Amino acid sequence: MTSSKVNLENYLNNHYVHRSNWLRAAVLGANDGILSTASIAIGVAAASETRDPLILATLAGLVAGALSMAAGEYVLVSSQTDIELTDIERERKELEEMPELELQRLAEIYEKSRLKKRNCSNSSRRTY
């Protein structure tokens, strides 16, 4: 980041965390789609003597599965984003209302990550 002050609204824009959600969704969706479509095709093929019902059922299963996965993933990602933005806003308010307590909490986080106690206070003051 070129500016000395980080804007919290765009802080995560250059991180890969948002991209990993879509990759995870694509892999899980492809796996789910392949299994459910194959199951539909096998079931219809076993019960039918002609090819037309098999093709129709398989295409219908593909479309229904794709729409279902897309809607589910949209709701999941939207909910996760809302939670993260709410957490950021809560932290912003806590920093404004009780900065010393937040500084102490940050030092405790650094301590738990095994920094020496003297360095924790210095690091948290620099971060804060």
Image (tube, rainbow, N blue to C red):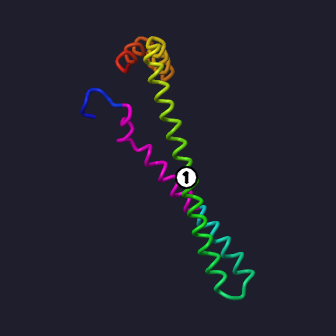
Q: Is residue 48 magenta?
A: no
Q: Position of residue 55 (x, y in %)?
A: 61, 80
Image side of residue 41 versus residue 99, left or right: right
Q: Which residue is mark 1?
A: 73
Above or below 19: residue 96: above
Image side of residue 36 versus residue 90, left or right: right
**Label 1 CA crowd tier, 10 Å (few <14, some 14–19, many 20+):** some
Q: Position of residue 54 (x, y in %)?
A: 65, 81
Image side of residue 41 versus residue 7, left or right: right
Q: Residue furthest bottom?
A: 50
Magenta stretch: give its range: 8-31
Q: Quadrant of the N terminus?
A: top left
Quarter of the view holding residue 44? bottom right
Q: Position of residue 36 (x, y in %)?
A: 64, 66
Q: Residue at x 47, y 13 (%)?
A: 98
**Which secondary structure lies at badge 1?**
helix
Q: Quadrant of the C terminus?
A: top left
Q: Residue at x 55, y 42 (%)?
A: 79
Above or below 114: residue 13: below
Quarter of the view holding residue 6? top left
Q: Position of residue 17 (x, y in %)?
A: 44, 43
Q: Is residue 22 magenta?
A: yes
Q: Nearer the viewer, residue 24 or 72?
A: 72
Given the image, on which type of amino acid does mark 1 rest?
Answer: Glu
